Image (cartoon, rainbow, N blue to C red):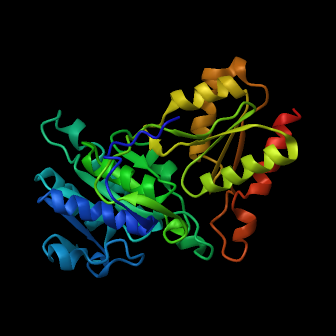
Amino acid sequence: QKRRFTFNLNCPTQKMNLFQSITSALDNTLASDPTAVIFGEDVAFGGVFRCTVGLRDKYGKDRVFNTPLCEQGIVGFGIGAAVAGATAIAEIQFADYIYPAFDQIVNEAAKYRYRSGNLFDCGSLTIRAPWGCVGHGSLYHSQSPEAFFAHCPGIKVVIPRSPVQAKGLLLSCIADKNPCIFFEPKILYRAAVEQVPEEPYIIPLSQAEILQEGSDVTLVAWGTQIHVMKEVAAMAQEKLGVSCEVIDLQTILPWDTETICKSVVKTGRLLISHEAPITGGFAAEISSTVQEECFLNLEAPISRVCGYDTPFPHIFEPFYIPDKWKCFEAIKKMINY
């Protein structure tokens, strides 16, 4: 499957890690859109992960500014700014701290257009937040709250896996006419490095990407877990002779049911993996949809390899996360079913 990018193939690229590609996307936005503003805790200083470094100096303190430590206020301000016509980019310092803003996101931002019969909307609001486990984050800095928001019509939820995806998907979120939540896998901020175009480009939302074609098992994930799935696919091929199709969902809401179901019709088996707890996690939604759509094509029960139903642990993190060995065992089970 070809990458669905829209940019000039001859434009200069630069070696960037994931946080630099985010900075590049924000820089492009501030340069091209005079109404764009970026705000959140410590963003004027570059943010805890350095995603906004240098932007205040370049564009001024009226466009890149710190807020009080109040997530409800950050998102509430963002909604007001977007309604008034600004391109509002709010940063929540960690996805774990998005919960105080839950009411503003779910009851205000997501319903603003519907409530006013399309007279008003806050569609130019984008909320960014570092997301997922980091190796030492424990219960307050490692959560993956995407499933909470997947239950809410009126917003879009997006999670990239790499620098190229991060820039293109973030620019799509900023351009989209619906409020978007953009979760950034924090463990990849410095780990992933790619050649990223310097000029703006978009990757369409709600389109999953097939990273590897296969015939025996469909593996679905997003964010950091995609890199685990790629390792698992290589292991399954090498040790079992099993051909895996690896799919990056990219957009959690509204998600690409067509690509996933098409793949499962071909392979007859599906494994979904995410770091969030298994009960009520987004894998359950994918699983139930595929079961409804592809029941007669399934050769084995759908498998979910996810986090446990406990708070995210600290020293036991290696046992908690859905690693390649757990996913490999799930594939063996499915193949031998």
306 over 119 or under it: above or below: below
Number of numbered discs visible in the structure rendering: 0
Res. 100 in view: no
Name the residue at 27% across, 49% down: 109
Name the residue at 63% across, 73% down: 135
Res. 216 in view: yes
183 over 214 or under it: above or below: below
**Front one among 118 and 22:** 22
Residue lying farthest right?
336
**Front one among 122 and 87:** 87
Residue lying farthest front?
10
Q: Quadrant of the C terminus?
A: top right
Measuring from the top left, give residue 177's x and y in whole percent.
24, 42
The image quarter in which residue 156 lies: top left
Q: Taking 107 as reference, is 308 left or right? A: right
The image quarter in which residue 154 lies: top left
The image quarter in which residue 94 lies: bottom left
Measuring from the top left, give residue 128's x and y in whole percent.
36, 61
Residue lying farthest top?
296
